[in-house]
Amino acid sequence: MPAEKNTCRYEPVQRVLGTYNKMWEDAQKDLDIQLQKEREEFLQPENDHEKVFKMLTTSYIKYMQIFRSLEMAHDQLMHRQKRAVIQQVLDGVMGRILEIKKEMVELENSEFHYVDNILLDLELLPEVLEVPIPRYFIKERLEVLQQREKMLDQILLDAGLQIQEPVKTMTSEEATRLIQVAERARQGRCRAALMKKLYLEDKRQNQTEPRVETGPSPDDAATCIQKVWRGYNQRQKTQKMREEEMIFLGMTLPPHLMARSNSQMHARQVNTLQSEVQERHEEVPIKDKLREMEGLHIKETLQDQIGQCFIESRHILGRFPDYPTEKAGGSKALFTDKTPEEILTELAEKKMMELQKKAQKGENKAKKEKPKEKPSQKTGSKPPVEEEGWKMAPSNFLSIMEEGNRQYKVFWQKREKGWDFHQDHDPELIKEEKREEVEEEIRVQVDELMQQKLTNLKFAVDGEKSHKQKKGKKSEKEKKTATKKKINEMEEDLTPDRTIDSLYEELVENGLVIKAQPVNLSDYVGEYSYLGSTLRQIDIEPMPSLADVRQLIALYGILPLGSQIVHEKAPLVKALLLAGPAGVGKKMLVHAICTEAGANLFNLSASNIAGKYPGKAGLQMMLHMVLKVARQLQPSVLWIGETEKIFSKGARKAEEEANPGRLAKILPKFLKVLKAQDRVLLVGTTNRPFDANLKPFCDVYKKIILIPRPDYSSRFVLWKHIILQNGGAITDLLDVSSLAKVSDGFTQGHIVQAVQAVLSELRLLQMTRKPLRTEEFLTSLATQDPVYKEEEETFKAWYDKTPLGKARIRALAGGKKPGKGKASV
């Protein structure tokens, strides 16, 4: 019976497995087709700009569709090995999307692209361009993130930087007093009603002239009742017709979609059971068994192979080889390097290359002695050089996708289609994975033994001592490390005796590590702009839409921080600048990056670090601590608010004490220290970028995202979203379209302030009998200053002076399509 109950419990989970297996299968088929297209299309040079852009955009959209399907299948499937294969392909698809995006940016010299015609040809909606955020970024690190949040809260409480909310408890005396107050209020209301009734009776009796009440005739009464009923009935019919018309026009949802259906309840039940089933098969004790069964055989095989390599090298080269260091891979490097036969051929090729170089040197001397010839006897000009067509750059992710596609075809495509109720693992596949780990562990032990054996052989056979060779090697390494230290002073460990926890605690107490607000990227509401392609056709560069901004934040900020493979192999973005008027949501986007990627947030704004770690040594110590903690607890986001003050042309008198410019010289060195394996992103926000010196500003922030004020469609959605978010209700008396039209020039911050000013606690209590009206929001909106056209033009003029803006203007002014000259970003 217990087994049957358990089976029934997990039955809702199993019903959906067929759907997501089918989704995975379809995504793999689409990926196979897309990989085949890349082999055919991207390898050939192409001179037509429009054809190249259409080819890149189509591939970008197709990969985005595959990405969305794979992410959904990876999140919903329970089989651990299937999820591992899907995650490998998923990381490859994410990286390929970033590579294609880089090619699109270099082709058009613009971060924003308008692809209305391509979407129309593919019969797709603009929603397909939305970048899905993989949920495994948070799910796989949920326990770590929760522990880190608890630790941060505890440090803030101990330092007095955060006040703990008191738990509301009520004593018996307070409860008795509350009941007494409520009872007295009830009795007072009853007494007031009774006194009113007595007063009306006395008033009726005290009337001097008694009236003879002759009621209306039955016909008049029936007419009155019919009149009221017909009016009520007609109002109901009119309201029903209006609702049906709105449903027909697609303005509102039908009632059966608005109500919570059984399928939604079923889906919620499936989600609650999903994590339990996924965790059930997370630990599989196969590695220990494999070490017991095959460990001895693997050890003997490795020793025999390494010993044979020593003998062959001694026979062919006349000396024993040098044992590779642990950083070089140990004995693994011996097998990955050339075999003895290949070493002989390589030596012969080197001799041939030396002879050829000597011959070339002799020819060059003979040419120098000859008199120089004229460039051309007929024309006297150089022959024209033909421009090479566009060609796709080599990819770091095609091999990853192809390997994942191969694993799917070999192991999963031809397996039985029946549902595996228990979602059991395949032990043979796990053995292949774990065998490599066991070999690596045993190889470390074998290296220690064989290295000692090699030194003994050298001393016994050749009479060599390892001390001399090691001494020479050390000197070379010391030279290399010395040069590296001179280049990168930030690499020096200034706190070798301190733990990461102590450094983290110090940064929190000084306010450099702050708590990120729980904001998702989907909360940054905004619509796609349909006028972009039209404006570009008439040579007007449009302002980007909020949907475009949301897309770039996901591509450059969230995806690389969430995946280690993507960050290491995709085009590296170390610094990101968010520029735009005040109130457009720049800080919100910084918090959204941290929330979606599970990253730590460091506040390095000039106002926040003022008075902390003074002097050059103190600043270097601060950045060293930040970098050390950010690397150890990656992913991390380093936020610099009002970053234009660091590169300002002249500091104000009130800001001289803060000295905001002390970060300007050290930031480029700080970014050079960051490597591809460090998931650390520098994000700057500014609402006055034109106050900064452009060259050092753009040297630090290679990626610049210009955030505009919202357009009409975005404002329409924003008004609805913010009113509902603050507890309001949208009725027919509230004309959201008029609000969106009147609020032209106002930002998201202005709209939030206007809504919060209207929807007070008292106003929310009156909502049922007094619905919201349009004119209520106008008073609060009129007290705020909008973003005028001149300010928006100032931002556009500044962006045109950036390297990417200059490259686009240069390409357009040169009478050729953007893309023939690549931008320096």
Image (spheres, rainbow, N blue to C red):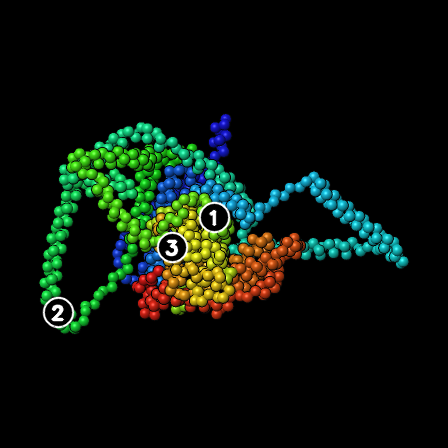
Dot 2 and dot 1 residues touching (CB under 8 Å): no
Label 1: how many residues lie within 10 Å, few (<14), some (14-19) or many (20+)? some
Residue 370's place in the image compared with 55, above or below, is below
Residue in front for this viewpoint, 789 or 679: 679
Residue in front for this viewpoint, 219 or 808: 808
Disc 3/disc 2 C-alpha distance (Å): 52 Å
Residue in front for this viewpoint, 311 or 437: 311
Q: Which of marks 2 and 1 is nearer the N terminus?
A: 2
Left or right of 822: which side holds 638? right
The residue that appears at 39% across and 38% down in the rendered structure is 80
Q: Quadrant of the C terminus?
A: bottom left
Q: Which of marks 3 and 2 is nearer the N terminus?
A: 2
Disc 3/disc 1 C-alpha distance (Å): 20 Å
Callout in the foreground (2, 1): 1
Circle 3: residue type: Phe
How far from the left and from the top, in percent, is residue 102? 35, 56
User: In this rendering, does residue 534 appear at all?
Assistant: no
Circle 2: residue type: Glu
Outermost residue on the top side: it is 1
The secondary structure type at the circle numbered 2 is loop
How far from the left and from the top, in percent, is residue 816? 31, 67
Q: In which quarter of the image is residue 56?
A: bottom left
User: Residue tagged by mark 1?
Assistant: 506
Residue 769's place in the image compared with 382, above or below, is above
